[in-house]
Amino acid sequence: MTEEVYHDLQKHLDQFPIGYPATKSGVEIRVLKHLFTPKEAEIATKLKWSYETVDDIHKNVEPNISTGELEKTLDTMVSKGLINFKREGDKKHYAIIPLVVGIYEYQVNKLTKEFIEDFDQYKDNEFALEIISTKNLQVRIIPLEQSLTPENQVASYDEIRKIIENTEEDSIGLANCICRQLKDLQGQPCSRTSQRELCLYFRNTGRLFLDQGWARPITKDEALELLRNAEKEGLVLQSGNTKDPEFICCCCNCCCISLSKAKDIPRPAQFLASNYYAVVDKELCTGCGTCLERCQMKALKLVNDISKVNLKRCIGCGLCVSTCPEEAIQLHKKDEEIEPPSTVEDLYAEIGNIKEDLRRKLNK
């Protein structure tokens, strides 16, 4: 019975837009066992993608569990980073979350070597295919503030300053980067930065991180200063892919799950959501190679001592623009601008539609 409940949870998680596919090795079950007790796993199989109150959830669980006992278990699961949580008035609301973006990021400051070993195996195989099938639409590339010009007519969801300004200051939390914590435990520290507090959380997610002590509060000015320093260190900014994102991470291709995968595929520009691409002015470029060193996707190379952009690899982050000594590179907006979904719920509905279309094509 104990083993069966973890298989039930795997099947339950696999129903949602970001699924949780089974493997021949059973590593996905081992990952769940690191995280959930049998009782927690059983309750998790009753949770939905949308938020519900304790009373709503209680209708679907075993009748011998009292509402008070259920609430206590749910709160423990929240503290362990296993489910989502928010308050609306005096009511608590809970919801299931995917492995990534979700349970994994919520394990900040709680990682163990045993969990990492199984998580790494899973994310590099079946779960990697799951993420690729959704085109990784959970996140989007935010261009560096210094790389944009007034001519770009930047939408608020692509402008760092507007994202921060539109966030309630009491909901901003700064947390350690889970990916770099994982690499530190593996003895492979980040090659780009020694900083670890590099993940910003906002709104409901920010309040959750602050309430649980996973993040510390910072001001809007401090958040902007952090992002300016990230630019100096050559880090790519990734946010949640909604108009009012709930997180911004300062990422590198040696630690970040999405960037480390993207750099190894032929066309990262198709894998990462972005509205921009870099363009080199041949008349101004002197072939110094500074942009090649800054690019994390290997999208630039020197051809006849002039820098050339591979648009299949360029993700429009702006790292090459901000340090070009001759100001020979600019970001241009793509002809077809991708407007992100309004809410997380809309985002996952879109991801679900993409996966359903893919299934239809495969079954033809």
Image (tube, rainbow, N blue to C red):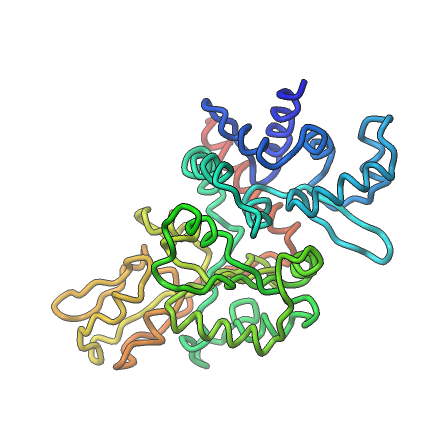
Query: Quarter of the image containing the N terminus?
Result: top right
Q: Residue at x 32, y 70 (%)?
A: 320
Residue 288, above or below 188: below
Question: Does residue 334 appear in the picture of this structure?
Answer: no
Image x and y of residue 43, in percent: 73, 33
Q: List the single residue furthest toward the left.
A: 304
Q: Give the left or right position of residue 110, taking residue 169 as reference.
A: left
- The percent coordinates of residue 14 (x first, y second) are 59, 32
The image position of residue 356, as x and y in percent, is 55, 36
| Residue that appears at 42% across and 51% down | 184
The number of numbered badges drawn on the structure is 0
Q: Look at 86% across and 26% down and name the residue there.
A: 64
Q: Nearer the viewer, residue 265 or 99?
A: 99
Front one among 324 and 69: 69
Please tell me which residue lies in front, 63 or 290.
63
Q: Quadrant of residue 124?
A: top left
